[in-house]
Amino acid sequence: MRAVQMTAVGQPLELRYALAREPAAGEVRVRIRAAGICHSDAHYRAGLSAMGPMPITLGHEIAGVVERVGGGVGAGAVGDRVCLHYLLTCGTCANCIAGRESFCVRGAMLGHHVDGGFAESITVPARNAVLLPDAIPFEHGAVMMCSSATALHALRRGRLRTGETVAVFGCGGLGVSAVQLARALGAREVFAVDLAPDKLALARTLGAVPVDARDGDPVAAIRAATGGAGADVTLDFVGQPATMQAAVRVLAPQGRAVLVGLTRAKLELDPYREILGPEAELIGSNDHTLGELHELIAFVQRGQLDLSHAVTATVPLDAAAINRVLDALEQGRAGVRTAVVP
């Protein structure tokens, strides 16, 4: 089968040919119908995070159709529309049992540690295949597996309560979902901070108050709009020192800043003025749980999460096309989300 793979850190991805693995007991092989291109893929290509053995197929946002099953998996699963939980876990270690599956001692991530979705098919444990209702397009099911799921997990980590105010820094693939999910979870007001006029306009249509960071200090703007109170929960999807600092500095007393954007940049804060005095919390958030994927599908079915705005472009399974999208993500000029459609 065709697969677009990373062969070396810092080098363009390459179109190669790989064997489509037959499913073993408890596994399914999925014919990929859509795979989202995430900003994390650009980080992986650049070497920001250690990868599995190369060459490795990138792509962790995956949806498709079950085409073969291994032993112990009912033959009726063939033909099922599915989206794939990208965390491969053992299910038996202490972390898995406690619901902290992202910390599984034997865990691996599709498209990061093992081959992912920039290919024609993929073989995964059957428990990683989540049924995708017919009404949800494959492209939407794919991006739900990371951008939407990571946004929901971040809001859960921030312990958002009904009536609280939320500020979202970065209105790309994750931010578009975060704005909608925050409202669905009961946020009184949601502020969306970005530099791109099109993303700010989209945030407004989704019910957020847009804050153009080009016009001045977003912290001052949000404090002015809230009568000086600030935001109860902030989410940083950018991973730059300025946005992480702003996410902390705009907090209301006892507010929670959730950092999500991948970065190695150092974060400098005034511990007394910005953390201790206001009793603020700085929270890390990474990945999501299988249960949250089922929650997301329910949000879509109830009309509370509309991903038609999230997928702004599609490209074929072509190395040059995917590399162009990754370049655009690195340069801050990509659309909300691009999906690979093999």
Image: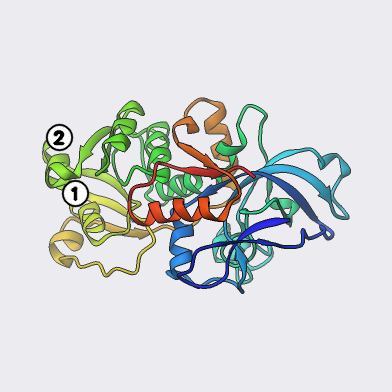
The amino acid pointed to by label 1 is Val
- Count the numbered circles shown: 2
Residue found 43% across the figure and 39% down from its top: 177
Q: CA distance from mark 1 to mark 2?
A: 11 Å
Looking at the picture, tell me which residue is in the foreground, 155 or 178.
178
In the rendered image, the vertical position of residue 86 relative to residue 142, given as above or below: below
The amino acid pointed to by label 2 is Ala
Secondary structure, mark 1, is loop
Residue found 77% across the figure and 52% down from its top: 29
Residue found 26% across the figure and 50% down from its top: 255
In which quadrant of the rendered view does residue 87 lie?
bottom right
Q: Quadrant of the C terminus?
A: top right
Residue 250: give its label: 1
Residue 225: give its label: 2
Q: Quadrant of the N terminus?
A: bottom right
Left or right of 264? Residue 318 is: right
Earlier in the chain: of badge 1 and badge 2, it is 2
Percent position of residue 66, x then y: 77, 44
Confirm whether residue 260 shows in the render. no
Other-residue count near label 1 (Cα within 10 Å), few / some / many at <14 / 14–19 / ≥20: many
Confirm whether residue 22 shows in the render. yes
Left or right of 62? Residue 149 is: left
In which quadrant of the rendered view does residue 81 lie?
top right
